[in-house]
Image: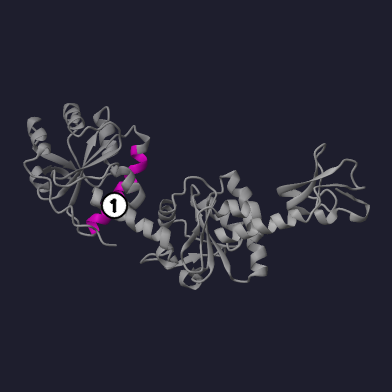
Amino acid sequence: MAVSTDYQVKFPESGDLYSILAAEGIEFLLSHSGEVPLEYIHGKTICLFFSANWCRPCKDFTPELVKLYENLQTRGEELEIIFVSFDHDMTLFYEHFWCMPWLAVPFNLNLLNKLRDKYRISRIPSLVPLYSDEISVAEDVIGLIEDYGPEAFPFTKKRKEELKAIDDSKRIGGQLEKLLTHESRNYVVARNGSKVLVSKLVGKTIGLYFGAHWCPPFRSFTSQLLDVYNELATRDKGSFEVILVSTDRDSREFNINMTNMPWLAIPYEDRTRQDLCRIFSIKLIPALVIIGPEEKTVTTNAREMVSLYGSRSFPFTESRIVELKACLKKEGDSLPRKVKDKKHEHELKLDMAKAYVCDFCKKQGRFWAFSCDACDYDLHPTCVEEQDALLV
């Protein structure tokens, strides 16, 4: 993926950071191997990392920043991160710094206060790229890194706009292989661990299923989706496939999920899972996104379609839902509004029900039912004994 070149102007060596360090009499930075002269960072892109050992979000984010730093070092980027500690004493400072592969300013509360005020740090963790005034830094650099990883570099507004445009293109255009694969993985995994090439799925209707085993609504909806999946596998062989995009907390939960599902999944260790959640703005689970046979996004709200209409909603297009509503209205218009049936003492009224169990045949029902207002009793329209029923 191309990276914009708007970061080429470096933070001036005579800039404010050096002035503040000089005012405190600091002539070196710290590394794990000892003191590093300030000249070492001249000409590099500098980012100040404000963090603390006592801060849980800081400790959660630091491993992500380590991965980014090591990736950018491998790419040959002239980047240096400098840790500025919010810790309360030197012991905590060194304990936190131990897990960081970059540099740090010496532990100094007076220096911390000056840097915090200069760069307007109101919360931690914070990552502050030091660029000249000609370059606009993106708001919320931490969030940008959490969303995009190393591709967030160089953390500018321009780069954020580029990444957002790429996401928009993928969301609108679909293109299955661009969505689901990258240079080191061109497959999804099946329940038995086998690999299925994404290229083999092109031309099918694909459901991207977002959810986690710990989520009760996800487990409930999975049973509905499973019914739809099995019905379509019988009725429209090979036309519909589901791919789990797991938001499980760990690989153990992911594996439990997979044992209960007949469909495919993005590998748990793959960052594409987070990318897809970002691209489709997944805020609540479960969620079901449909990519059509033409590799374009059909809907991001297929969960509601499946809940309301089951397999009849396939291929989950808006035109299909319009057609279904018209068909159901026609069915309802052909039925009486009320009936009296010898199997039940009260009058039964025609009602629309998302799902119910018929009290006579004990089978699942959907859409139209004859229901009792006085008690919990429902009949399939086909279970009404018309010869003994009074049609109203």
Which of the pair 356/49 is nearer the observer? Answer: 356
Which of the pair 318/220 is nearer the observer? Answer: 318
Q: Position of residue 176 (x, y in %)?
A: 45, 66
What crowding class fits label 1: few (fewer than 14 Cα within 10 Å), some (14-19), or many (20 or more)?
few
Total number of numbered discs in the rendering: 1
Q: Where is residue 279 in the image (x, y as percent from the top left)?
A: 41, 54
Secondary structure beneath disc 1?
helix
* 155 on left or right of 297: left
Instruction: Name the residue carrying label 1.
Output: 161
What residue type is disc 1 on?
Glu
Which residue is rendered at x = 17% and y = 54% of the image? 78
Q: Where is residue 381 in the image (x, y as percent from the top left)?
A: 81, 54
* 375 on left or right of 76: right
Q: Is 366 drawn above or below residue 59 in the view shown?
A: below
For the stretch drawn in magenta, the main secondary structure is: helix
Q: Would residue 142 be visible to someone looking at this image?
A: yes
Task: Answer whether residue 60 is magenta in the image.
Answer: yes
Q: Would residue 310 be visible to someone looking at this image?
A: no
Q: Give the range drawn in magenta.
A: 58-74
